[in-house]
Amino acid sequence: MASLEWWRFLRGFLANPSGVASPIPAGKALAAAIARNIDPTMPGTVLELGPGTGAVTAEILKRGVQPSDLVAIESDENFSAFLRMTYPGIRIETGDAFRFPDVLTRLGIKEPLRAVVSGVPVLDKPVPLRKQYLNSAVGHLRDGAPLVQFSYGVVPPIPPTEGVQVTRGAFVWWNIPPLHIWIYRKSANSKTSAVTAA
């Protein structure tokens, strides 16, 4: 990745370490592993939360998602401006990812989502807020569609709630730093929550 992009990401992290998950952008291997969880044949919008400088965004598009079917919400205005220049066909919104339903309503997106990809740091948030975020995201998804959350943690960063199951999709050890990819979906049995390891 170009050194200019690394510097842009590091500058964003230093300015807002609680809002930017890492001092460097996601590596290509991690970004590709995240994007592989999106079904390119499923209809609907893909929502990317916390895209940063777009490392994962690029892989989502390579996966076959059309730019017009991708909405990204980024809290850092500088990152948002960079994304708008780099990916002009994507709807880029600047705002709080935890308030994404407001953005979807404003954009007129009413149909269930094909996927939610979350690069938002959640481990520093209170557990009730994390669970609210999870339930809202899963509630906006089509049946079988994933919420993809990546995290440093060796356990799911958001405890699964009733009606939600979580699977560790991958551990990308060659990323800097190594990260786990966690996949949340509606449970087949809505009465239970489960944690499984791939």
Image (cartoon, rainbow, N blue to C red):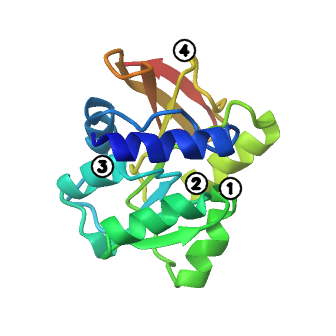
Label 3 SS:
loop
Q: Report the residue marked by disc 3.
A: 38
In the picture, the quarter occupied by the N terminus is: top left
Circle 1 SS class: helix
Distance from label 1 to label 3 (Cα)? 21 Å
Discs 3, 4 touching: Cβ within 8 Å: no
- Disc 1 to disc 4, how far (Cα)? 23 Å
In three-dimensional space, the C-alpha distance between marks 3 and 2, rounded to whole angstroms, equals 15 Å
In the rendered structure, find residue 154 and report the number of the disc placed on it. 4
131 shown above or below 84 = above
What residue is shown at x 33% (from left), y 71% (from top)?
69
Q: CA distance from mark 3 to mark 4?
A: 23 Å
Q: Earlier in the sequence, mark 2 or mark 1?
A: 1
Q: Which amino acid is tagged 1?
A: Phe
State which tag comes first along the sequence, 3 or 4: 3
> Can you tell which mark lies on residue 137?
2
Find the distance from the CA under tag 4 to the CA under tag 2: 22 Å
Q: Secondary structure at mark 4?
A: loop
Provide residue 189's location: percent of width, then percent of height.
Answer: 53, 38
* Disc with the residue nearer the chain's start (1 vs 3): 3
Q: Earlier in the sequence, mark 1 or mark 4?
A: 1
Q: Which mark is residue 98?
A: 1
